[in-house]
Amino acid sequence: MRNNVLIIGGGPAGLEAGANLQRLGYNVLLVEHSNTLGGHLGKWDRLFPSGTPASGALDKLLGSMDGVKCFTDTEIQSINRLGKSYNVILSNGITVLADAVLVATGFDLFQAEKKEEYGYGIYDHVITNADLEQYFKTGLDARINAPKKIGFVHCVGSRDEKSGCRSCSKVCCATAVKQACEMKAVFPDAQIYCFYMDLRMFGRHYEDMYLEAQRDYGIRFIRGRVAEVSENIDGGLSVKAEDTVSSKPLKVSLDLLVLMAGMRPSVSGQRIGSLLGMQNEKDGYFEVLSEITAQQRSPIPGLFLAGAATGPKTLPDTLADARGAATQIDKYLSDIFPKAKDLKQLIKTAW
């Protein structure tokens, strides 16, 4: 007889936590609102800093899910506290009685079209980091046609008061450096520029990646925000910026501009939060019990958090956070439920 745990979200955090909880002996049910598991990881080609294929990392996570019951293309219709447990009704007509709930709803990418001065959705040759990663996966994007001059704009929707996000998204700098090097490998004759506020290469081997980008790939890094993007008569792009190192304005003609869209709280996650009465902090992410000692615990009993639901994280940070959440849930259930419930209580049909 084992306790029942419901995980909301089938990205890396949900998958890693689910596998760990299953190994700890719990009945685990995972609900994902989209039709596939993997979240943003499933849309990525290669990972920094080593260029590891994202598909390999995702396959490893999915391969550890034996015994975890997963529902895709499924929404949470209602969720209510029932004694020490949660009664959850799913959109597929199934009712779940869970002794603990883990919210792992991830993040959404900032909608780059909100930064109108950059021209995303207006000019043909302005794309986002997510668009470029899909190009690396498929080799298909009509907007990328042997560009000779390519620019990357860091911090699009991050560290930006006007965009409603003062925080750093943590992954944009490293992603920009990775993608710049990859574009140079695909288009070796191209000149590539990175426009940045300051580079936050904080992880192990990240600084090496940045140095290699300059030394081995000839990427030019320009410290300064892009002020304006316009389209030339020939369809090319004219980019105005300021080089704050030389204190001089800069104007560059480009064939392709890549916007490094940052992380924002998940819209689907906020809907779950409203159902549960969860509180958000000033940055829009969910409140945790303690930033120091209980980052995976919500102030609400029996409700836990993992991954980017509580703020921007790299993939390694997300997986570590998920393992921490599994440990926290194990401790909570061991303390609260000395006698586990039977598997038959995990899922029962609505009728």
Image (cartoon, rainbow, N blue to C red):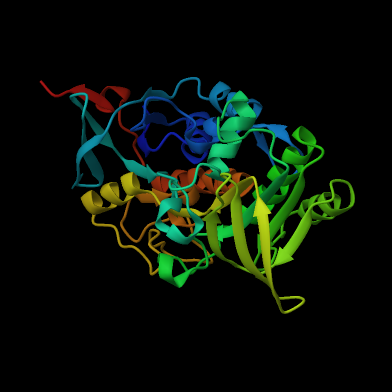
Does 279 sit left or right of 184 as displayed? left
Instruction: Farthest residue to the left: give it.
Output: 351
Image location (x, y in percent) of residue 69 = 39, 23
> Residue at (33%, 33%) from the top-left corner?
33
Residue 277: which quarter of the image? Answer: bottom left
Instruction: Give the position of the N terminus as an image quadrant.
Output: top left
Image location (x, y in percent) of residue 307 = 50, 48
Does 6 sit left or right of 107 as displayed? left
The image shows residue 144, relative to residue 113, as above or below, that is above
Instruction: Give the position of the C terminus as an image quadrant.
Output: top left
Q: Foreground: 279 or 100? A: 279
Image location (x, y in percent) of residue 22 = 48, 29
Q: Foreground: 22 or 126? A: 126
Question: How many numbered markers are drawn?
Answer: 0
Residue 91: which quarter of the image? Answer: top left
> Residue at (40%, 59%) from the top-left corner?
285
Q: Is residue 111 visible?
A: no
> Residue at (34%, 43%) from the top-left corner?
101
Instruction: Farthest residue to the front: give it.
Output: 233
The image shows residue 144, relative to residue 159, as above or below, that is above
Image location (x, y in percent) of residue 61 = 57, 29
Does 137 sit left or right of 3 as displayed? right
The image shows residue 65, relative to residue 242, as above or below, that is above
> Residue at (59%, 51%) from the top-left corner?
237
